[in-house]
Image (cartoon, coloured by chain):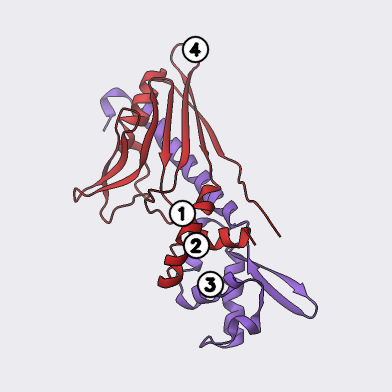
Amino acid sequence: MANANAQFAALADPTRRAVFQRLRRGRLSVAEIAHGLPVSRPAVSQHLKVLKQAGLVADEAAGTRRVYHIDPKGLAAIRTWLDQFWDDALAAFAAEVERPEGKRR
Amino acid sequence: MNKTITPAPVRKTVRVNAPPQRAFDVFTAGMGRWWPKSHHIGKSDPETFVIEPKPGGRWFERGVDGVECEVGKVLVFEPPSRLVLAWQLSADWQYDAGLITEVEVRFLPEGANATRVELEHRDLERFGERAEGFRATIDSEGGWGGLLALFAQNASQ
């Protein structure tokens, strides 16, 4: 499950970040992404795989090639993250409200 | 291709065995006692979280080092029934004065000694919209703090 933490973790690697930022220009093939980067094409493919698993990029077939683009559903991951955050926060809030008087911090 | 992303608000309900006034007080004045310690903004551990009890009041974290970090502000303060906060933390957990997403909390009495607390965190699409303005900065710095700018740009293509 992609979430914001996974997305930020995926982007913590500088090369992966460079790969991701190239996609801001639009839809690119692996060869186009790798062009000018100091890493091999297989390495770029590996980075794309991680980015895809984090929900940051998506890919599709274009003729015989596979092209990558930034996944606009990434916002959904932010939402999922907030959803989980409020679950945790409200559970802690409820516990605090119901804490017996003498045991309140 | 134009695509507008409008994520649904995050909605939560929790029932507590206490009257609305107590629930409201713990949520606001007592936030430092329940806010997950794992989620803080400052460099040091948080000492407490403060919601100033008035419209326009600040909502901030105070670290054990005394440094105060803004979370957002108070938009509506109507004890014991309603609270609206401006959540101004971006997705990378940094305060952004230009980002305003709303967190509305309602405290509804259930019988004599219980409260249903309903929370809605809305305007989530603004995480994307706001990021548009930072594109130049992100371009120049190559930073990844603007992750959402990338989503926003892609969404508007």
Mark pair 3, 1: CA separation: 17 Å
Say which residue label 2 marks.
Answer: B147
Q: Which of marks 1 and 4 is nearer the N terminus?
A: 1
Subunit of mark 3? A
Mark pair 4, 2: CA separation: 46 Å
The chain painted purple is: A
Mark pair 3, 4: CA separation: 55 Å
Say which residue label 4 marks.
Answer: B111
Q: Which of B76 and B115 is in front in this view?
A: B76
Mark pair 3, 2: CA separation: 9 Å
The chain painted red is: B
**Residue extending farthest right:** A63
Say which residue label 1 marks.
Answer: B91
Say which element carries label 4: loop
Subunit of mark 4? B
Say which element carries label 1: loop
Q: Earlier in the sequence, mark 1 or mark 2?
A: 1
